[in-house]
Image (cartoon, grey):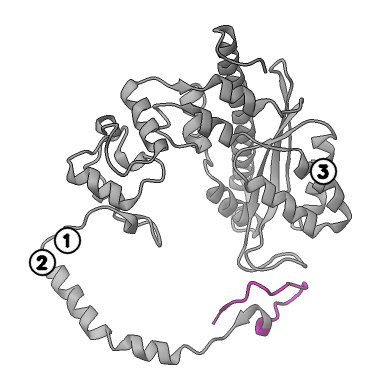
Amino acid sequence: MHIDTTYVYRGGEYELDRLLRIEDVTAEARESMRSVPQRLEEFRLMLAGPEPDVRIGNQCKRPYPCEFAAYCHAFLPERYPITALPRLAERTLHALLEAGITSIHDVPDDFPGLTLGQREAAAAVRAGEPTVDGRGIARALAPLVWPAYHLDFETIAPALPRWPGTRPYETVPFQYSVHVHHPDGTAEHREYLHTGDDDPRPTLAARLLADLGEIGSVVHYTPYERGVLAGLADALPELEERFADIIDRLFDLEPVIRVNTRHPEAAGRSSIKFVLPAWCPDLSYSGLGIADGQTASVRYLRVLRGETTGAEAVRVLADLAEYCGLDTYAMVRLLDEMRRLADADVASGTGEVL
């Protein structure tokens, strides 16, 4: 028995015969039982013997993060471990380990199996300083229309839908942050955090459309915001055209940085959690009460369900506001830094005017 994600909640009591789907797996279960005695014996031998000698690899993260990952990765250096190389294939990881290489700093430029991006990341770490294609940044930023509206959502996707018209695990935004960024570098902050028990989308959507104005690029970091906006358009068909206009204004900052820059502190990773402290060292997500989207979703749901109340609930809401606000302020600072890098190339006579 498992949840049917096509079920649409109508309100009131859940229709369990539609929410849950039953499948007969008796034959598969009986076939699987044949292997149980052998597996149990393997487990007994493993427990009675020495610590298993297993190399780190894909199994450390898939299908789920392993609880022993920190223990098994302890031999790697704290700074620049080879596992920080972006999109590192398991066979290349094992080849590096077999060669006795554990730090990105020691990865040769001609090591077989590395992608161009991984070679560039290793080169930046070895050089100890960033590399920048200012002309590439200038070209990438040319379509940007000012003012820039930096947008970030926080969402929940509960297994049991809370509001009529929603499905199990459907993504529902409950919070956004917008920093309105002007060409002179100034910015003002607009935000919304839904605190009621009703469906957050109608009120959030109305506020968001007002806060995003009608002219100017809507800047985001990776495609997630595009999907949330499309979901709002589907859920609120009366606003579909207005959200289509917003989607047409989207500008993704992540590829501008990923394609045109290499910073040793980011080690080739383009996640904003790594890129922000690399290019703007006075800013970081460390020390925040909430520092990632999954934690934001879980703690918001606990407040919504009444599991977190009083002063603790007030603190969670404040932490949510701080975290979401930093996401968009980070984009303000990163965009300013990219413009500065491109302008530096212009000043040196090798770049293009923004």
Q: Residue at x 76, y 53 (%)?
A: 232
Q: Earlier in the sequence, mark 1 or mark 3?
A: 1
The kind of secondary structure element at disc 3 is helix
Q: Earlier in the sequence, mark 2 or mark 3?
A: 2
Q: What residue type is labelled 2?
A: Gly
Instruction: Give the x, y percent position of residue 264.
Output: 39, 27
Question: Which residue is label 1 attached to?
Answer: 52
In front of the other: 245 or 296: 245
Q: Which of marks 1 and 2 is in front?
A: 1
Q: Which of marks 2 and 3 is in front?
A: 3
Which residue is at the far right?
A: 238
In terms of secondary structure, what is the magenta stretch mainly? loop
Mark 1 nearby-residue class (10 Å; few <14, some 14–19, many ≥20): few
Q: Quadrant of the N terminus?
A: bottom right
Question: Which residue is label 3 attached to?
Answer: 245
Q: Which residue is drawn at 28% across and 47% down?
A: 93
Q: Quadrant of the C terminus?
A: top right
| Label number found at residue 198 | none
In front of the other: 12 or 209: 209
Residue 5: tell me if it is visible. yes
**How far apart are the two marked residues, 2 and 3, measured between alpha carbons?**
64 Å
| Label number found at residue 49 | 2
In front of the other: 78 or 56: 56
